[in-house]
């Protein structure tokens, strides 16, 4: 779907080194922005629109770096492998959901001289394909990078005067 039609994203990152292993954002109908709906510690926190736009653009531009040959990669069975990450993208009805599953390959490479360490599949692209590691890193973000981290809001065009004071002066 188009990025404007996405009403929610849920990410599951079992091997996350930073932040919660699962997070979820939902579109706020009133202003069109997004807020975290899970985990509980982030619930209601605003998502930075520019970060969400970048994330959704990366997701929409996701493309395979190649397809495995017959029998490649060796020793990989997607039916028995735990996903490295899963993304569920909720679109408007009746389009429903798009699911993207990313697997880390056990030996760190795709075999046969390939550098790719990840395979991915989705609702739309059911055949597994290789993904570049830099692509995976951008998609499997910590929710911190999506959150609106501004401490205050200032309309810079309405500021007439600003005074900065150091403590004790």
Image: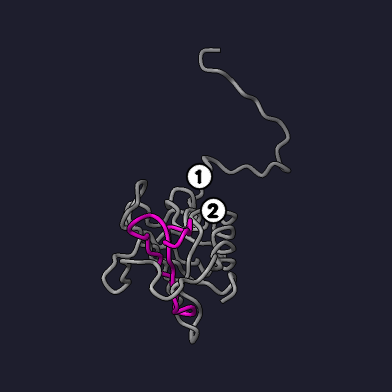
Residue 2 badge = none
User: x, y (%) of residue 53?
Assistant: 59, 60
Q: Above or below — where is 137 with respect to 103? A: above
- Asked whether disc 2 touches disc 1, contact meaning CB atoms under 8 Å apart, the reply is yes
Asked where in the image residue 51 lies, by quadrant, the reply is bottom right
Residue at point 56%, 12% (across, down): 169
Residue on which disc 1 sits: 149
Of 153 and 12, the residue lying toward us: 12
Residue 7 located within the stretch drawn in magenta: no
Q: Position of residue 54 (x, y in %)?
A: 58, 57
Residue at disc 2, secondary structure? loop
Task: Quote the CA–CA distance across marks 2 and 1.
Answer: 8 Å
Give the residues in magenta.
100-127
**Residue 71: where, in percent of width, then height?**
38, 73
Residue 108 located left or right of residue 34: left
Residue at the image position 46 percent from the left and 71 percent from the top: 68
Label 2 Cα crowd, 10 Å radius (few <14 / some 14-19 / many 20+): some
Helix, strand or loop at label 1? It is loop
The count of marks equals 2
Q: Nearer the viewer, residue 114 or 8?
A: 114
Q: Quadrant of the N terminus?
A: bottom right
Q: Residue furthest top?
A: 169
Q: Which residue is under mark 2? A: 48
Residue at image point 40% right, 69% down: 72
> Which of the two discs, 2 and 1, labels the residue nearer the N terminus?
2
**Along the viewing direction, whichever of 135 and 96 lies nearer the viewer:** 135
**Badge 1 local density, few (<14 within 10 Å), some, or many (20+)?**
few
Q: Toward the viewer: 150 or 11?
A: 11
> Residue 82, located in which quarter of the rendered image?
bottom left
């Amino acid at each position: 779907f188009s990025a404007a039609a996405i009403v929610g994203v849920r990410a599951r990152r079992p091997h996350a080194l930073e932040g919660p292993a699962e997070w979820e954002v939902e579109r706020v109908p009133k202003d069109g922005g997004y807020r975290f709906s899970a985990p509980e510690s982030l619930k209601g926190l605003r998502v930075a629109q520019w970060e969400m736009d970048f994330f959704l653009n990366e997701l929409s531009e996701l493309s395979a770096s190649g397809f495995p040959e017959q029998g490649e990669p060796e020793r990989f069975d997607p039916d028995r492998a735990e996903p490295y990450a899963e993304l569920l993208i909720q679109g408007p009805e009746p389009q429903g959901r798009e699911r993207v599953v990313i697997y880390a390959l056990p030996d760190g490479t795709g075999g046969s001289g390939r550098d790719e360490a990840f395979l991915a599949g989705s609702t739309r692209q059911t055949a597994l394909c290789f993904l570049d590691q830099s692509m995976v890193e951008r998609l499997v973000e910590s929710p911190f990078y999506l959150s609106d981290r501004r401490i205050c809001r200032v309309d810079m065009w309405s500021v007439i005067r600003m005074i900065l004071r150091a403590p004790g002066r």
